[in-house]
Image: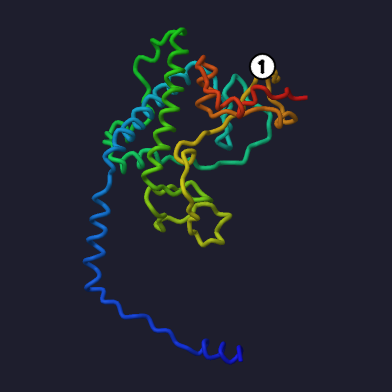
Amino acid sequence: MAFGQMNRVMNLRFYSSKVDWKRLRPMILKRIRNRAGDYPVKSMIPVAEDVLEARQLLGVGISVLLKFIPIKSCKFCPEIFIGCSGHEIKTCHSFKRNINGVLELCYQAGADISNEILHNPNPIPDNWSDVKAEEISQIAQNTMDAWERLRLGVQKLLMVYPAKVCRHCSEVHIGPSGHKARLCGVFKYEGWRGIHMWKKAEVSDLVPLKLVWHRRPCDPPTLSDAGRGFYGHAPAVVEICLQAGARIPKKYYCMMKTQGLPPP
């Protein structure tokens, strides 16, 4: 009995109702116009402008500190080490692209982006050579504060404006849904036929932490691969500000393993 009912259901044909698109199209366009009128959210415009200001202060501060704090970079991957010499930890994984979508998020949030910010995102001040040694710690503290302001502001904007990031490559889309205009640039995922695998963007997707190895007083002068499980990490901005004399928020202490055991 059940088999006969199943055959009758499978033999049924389902017909979709006819849609009058000429009548429906004006309603869809009106809904799109009404939704667009809600953006940008006026209360979030000061947040977007504060993010732009913090981004500028961060760029200026880092540009000055780079003249005083030694940094080593790998020739084959984006890894850097803040110190006089590099480490011996085997973590090189060739070249990977970095992502940057803060500007687009601020633009959609209503901030006015000048040509100077657009074409010169990290300006070096003309009077950086006049900076005295005793002023470095204050510059580092201002840079650290700008970093925290930047990440907090981006977090607030993401609560209002949706953003997507691809799971497999560095593509970012600011909007309610991902696009199909550009193919995924990671070759090992060609089985997906170049389709982006979108996910909700987080703060670290738009403002990457760029983790670097943190050398503690108990660590050797050159970090060895044998002790990689004992060493700590820190965002590059936090590490350079720390070495320049800035006060670091306690939330980074766990990542830096300040109370961790020394390597064997």
Residue 180 location in percent, x, y? 41, 58
| Left or right: 221 in relation to 250 | right
Q: How many marks?
A: 1
Identified at 38% across, 29% down, the residue is 55
Residue 75 position by quadrant: top right
Give the position of the N terminus as an image quadrant. bottom right
The residue that appears at 58% across and 32% down in the rendered structure is 74
The foreground one among 234 and 1 is 1
Badge 1: how crowded within 10 Å, few (<14), some, or many (20+)? few
Residue 81 coordinates in the image, percent (x, y) = 58, 26
The colour scheme of the drawn protein is rainbow
Nearer the observer, 177 or 12: 12
**Looking at the picture, does residue 69 appear above or below residue 14?**
above
Q: Position of residue 161 (x, y in %)?
A: 36, 45
Residue under label 1: 217
Q: Is residue 252 left or right of residue 16?
A: right
Q: Is residue 187 positioned above or below 138 on the image?
A: below
The residue lying furthest to the right in this view is: 264
Q: Is residue 184 above or below residue 154?
A: below
Q: Residue at x 26, y 73 (%)?
A: 21
Residue 38, horizontal then vertical, whole percent: 26, 48
Horizontal side of residue 184 vs 177, given as left or right: right
Quarter of the figure that contains the C terminus: top right
Q: Could you say which quadrant of the image residue 6 lies in? A: bottom right
Q: Secondary structure at mark 1?
A: loop
Say which residue appears at 66% left-offset and 16% top-offset. Answer: 217
Amino acid at the residue labelled 1: Pro
